[in-house]
Image: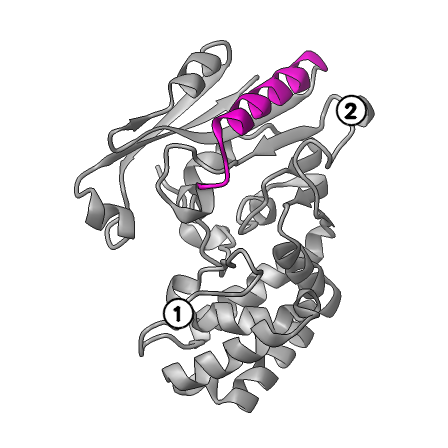
Amino acid sequence: MQPDEYIYVYSPMYYSGSKNRLLYWLIPLFPKNISTFYDLFCGGLSVSVNVHAANYVASDVSPFIINLYRAMQEAGSVGFMNKVDSYIKEYHIDDCTYESFYALRDVYNSKSNKYNLPEMLFTLVCYAYNSVLRFNSHDEYNIAPGRGATRLSQPRRANIYKFIDAISDRDIVFLCESYASALCLDDLDSDAFVYCDPPYIVSAAEYNTRWKWMHEYALYAFLDNVHSKGIKFGLSNAIRMGNKYNHVLDNWSKKYTVHNCTKVIYHGSQSSRQHKNAVTEEVYVCNY
C-alpha cells in the first residue's frame, strides 16, 4: 500500500530517472539503522532527503548541481529563495513570457563564473520546460521556457522550502566526484549503506547518452567490491525499457536480491508519446 504522500520530500527539479514517483516503493526497501548514507549518483537528491541515517554523503559529477545544493544548504530556504525572488523581479520572469526567460538565460550563459551563480540557475530551472536541469557541451543551460502556466505557485514554493530545509536538517556532505572517488571502502563501517542510481543505459534520454557499456561493467565490478567488504549496497536500474533489454544487469543481478517494479511509462512524458504502452521494468538490486 502506498503511504500518504505528504511524508515524502520531493525534488523540485526534473531528472531523467528521478525517484520522486517511486519513493513510496523504494525507501522501505532500504536498511534500517544506517550510519552513513552514500548517494553516489545523487542527481535530483530525492532519495537523500527522504532516507533516515546518522550521516549523509551525496555525490555527483556535475559541478552545477553540487554547487546548487551547497548554496541551498548555506543560505537556508529563506535566504536562498530571497535571492531567487530578486532575479524573478529583476527580469520580470514571473510574467511567463519567452522574452523574459531567454533574457535571463542569455545573461546566465554569458557569465564566466556561472558555477557560482546557483540562485540564477535555479530561477531558470523553476521556469524551464518540465523544470529540467541540463547543459550543452559548452556548459550552457539549454532548456526552453515552460508554457504559460509555468510559474512559482504557492504549492511549488512550499515544496521548494521543504526540500531546502531537508538538505539543511540533514547536514549533507556534498562532493563533486565520480562514484568510485567519493568514498574509501576501507573506511566504511558495517552500518554504512551505498546507494547507486546510475544513468539507465537502456533509456533513450539524452542525459544517459554519455553512459556506455564500459561504465556499466565498471559499476557492477565496484558494487561487487563493496559486497566483498561486507558493506550493504542498493542499486536502482532498469532491465527493460520498451524493446531495449539490459542483459548484463539481468545476469549480474542474479547473485543478489532483486525487487521488481514494473510500470507503464508515465503518461505525458516524451517516452510515452514515442512508445505508447511501452513497459519499463525497473529493479532495485541489493546485497542484503
Where residue 92 appears, x then y in whole percent? 48, 89
* Location of residue 97 by image quarter: bottom left
The color scheme shown is one colour
Amino acid found under the numbered disc labelled 2: Asp
Where residue 228 appears, x then y in whole percent? 68, 12
Which residue is located at x 58 percent, y 40 percent?
Answer: 41
Do residues under tags 1 and 2 come within 8 Å of each other at their CB atoms?
no
Report the front residue among 179 and 186: 179
On residue 144, the disc is 1
Around disc 2, counting alpha carbons within 10 Å, would you say few (fewer than 14), some (14 to 19), or many (20 or more)? some
The outermost residue toward the right is: 187
Classified by dominant secondary structure, the portion drawn in magenta counts as helix
Which residue is located at x 67 percent, y 36 percent?
Answer: 38
Around disc 1, counting alpha carbons within 10 Å, would you say few (fewer than 14), some (14 to 19), or many (20 or more)? some
On residue 189, the disc is 2
* Location of residue 162 by image quarter: bottom right
Above or below: residue 102 compared with residue 14: below
Where residue 56 appears, x then y in whole percent? 71, 43
Amino acid found under the numbered disc labelled 1: Ala
Which residue is located at x 58 percent, y 25 percent?
Answer: 219
Q: Is residue 73 magenta?
A: no
Horizontal side, residue 274 vs residue 82: left or right? left
Residues in magenta, as a range: 209-229
